[in-house]
Image (cartoon, rainbow, N blue to C red):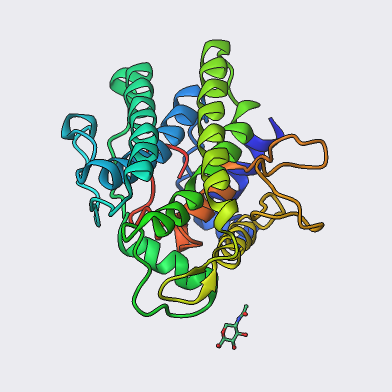
Amino acid sequence: MTLVLAFMLVCCVAPAFSAHEATKTAVAAPAPATIDDAAILNFALNLEYLEANFYSCAAYGKPIDKELWGGGPAPVGCRKAKLSRKMQLYAESIARDEIAHVVFLRAALGAGAVAQPLIDIGPAFVTAANVALNTTLVPPFDAYGNDVLFLHAAFIFEDVGVTAYKGAARLIANKDYLEAAAGILAVEAYHGGAIRTLLLPIANFKVVPYGVPVSAIIEAISALRNAASGAQVDQGLFNKQGGYVIAPADANAVAYSRTAAQVLSVVSLGGAMNKGGFFPQGLNGLIK
Ligand SMILES: *[C@@H]1O[C@H](CO)[C@@H](O)[C@H](O)[C@H]1NC(C)=O
């Protein structure tokens, strides 16, 4: 409940008027719409649209089926990634899961499912990499360029998905939805663990053509997500003692939570009104 209220205060409540202004304001501000289970599932659906389209493009060279867009626009920047045979299998495995999440959430929401928002899976990666590294990479970061670059792009999303589902758990009233969300969280966490496991053995390799080690770029992405969240809810590939971090988590090895506001800040790359980054026009639904 506290989180719901905190979120409403951040996002939805009109700024307080002074007493003087209030007397001049004849029309009361509309009450904020209720953040119910459907609103939370639609928030999740927006994130799944993003992930599903990224992996579908990387693996198959095309967005998710148009019939899953709900009348929304095509994503921007879709390309087939240049992947080794092994990495292609990873990309296909994750793509199947993320597309299934979209199908599942759309079915659970029925007519209440929000349309696919405008999704940027091209230029947004360039911006994310430049912001993370506080530089302008030349050539621009190419999420589809090779195995290593694809893994960096994948790393941006999965940990955020885990923290988003965990943060939303306490807001979901219906236990069937809660159990399903736990299951989706687990799948995102398997993906995140796999991506980290693929990155760890090459952590010291310098990423061509930038000459920056993998671990440094991953650390910068993690730091960017922390900064956008305004909270220490993220970890790179190594802990302070230099040990592997397969599962970013707190001191109890419990996965971190992010509030909806923190997730929005990350996926919009800190854009004003949560528009920008991977969602140039923001998300669809009540939580945006
Ligand atoms: C980013 O780079 C600029 C110019 O190179 C520098 O002045 C600034 O301090 C850097 N910011 C951070 C956070 O490192």
Pick the front one: 143 or 260: 143
Report ligand 1 position as a quadrant. Answer: bottom right
Residue at point 28%, 20% (across, down): 111
**In the rendered view, does 202 fall on the left or right side of 239?**
left
User: Residue 71, percent across and down?
Assistant: 18, 36
Viewer-proximal residue, 157 or 21?
157
Say which of 203 and 106 sits in front: 203
On the question of residue 12 being in view, the answer is: no
The quarter of the picture where the N terminus appears is top right
Whether residue 211 sits left or right of residue 4 in the image: it is left
Q: Quadrant of residue 221?
A: bottom right
Q: Is residue 256 left or right of residue 44?
A: right
Judge whether 103 appears above or below 244 on screen.
above
- Picture mark count: 0
Q: Is residue 96 visible?
A: yes
The image shows residue 152 at horizontal and vertical percentages of 47, 56
Relative to residue 62, is residue 77 depicted above or below? below
In-front residue for pair 208/267: 208
Image quadrant where one finds the C terminus: top left
Residue 273 in picture, x, y percent from top left = 46, 58
Residue located at (37% from left, 80% from top):
138
Quadrant for residue 5, please give it. top right
Instruction: Give percent across and percent down for residue 31.
Output: 51, 37
The relative height of residue 111 versus residue 35 in the rendered view (above or below) is above
The vertical placement of 174 against 197, above or below, is above
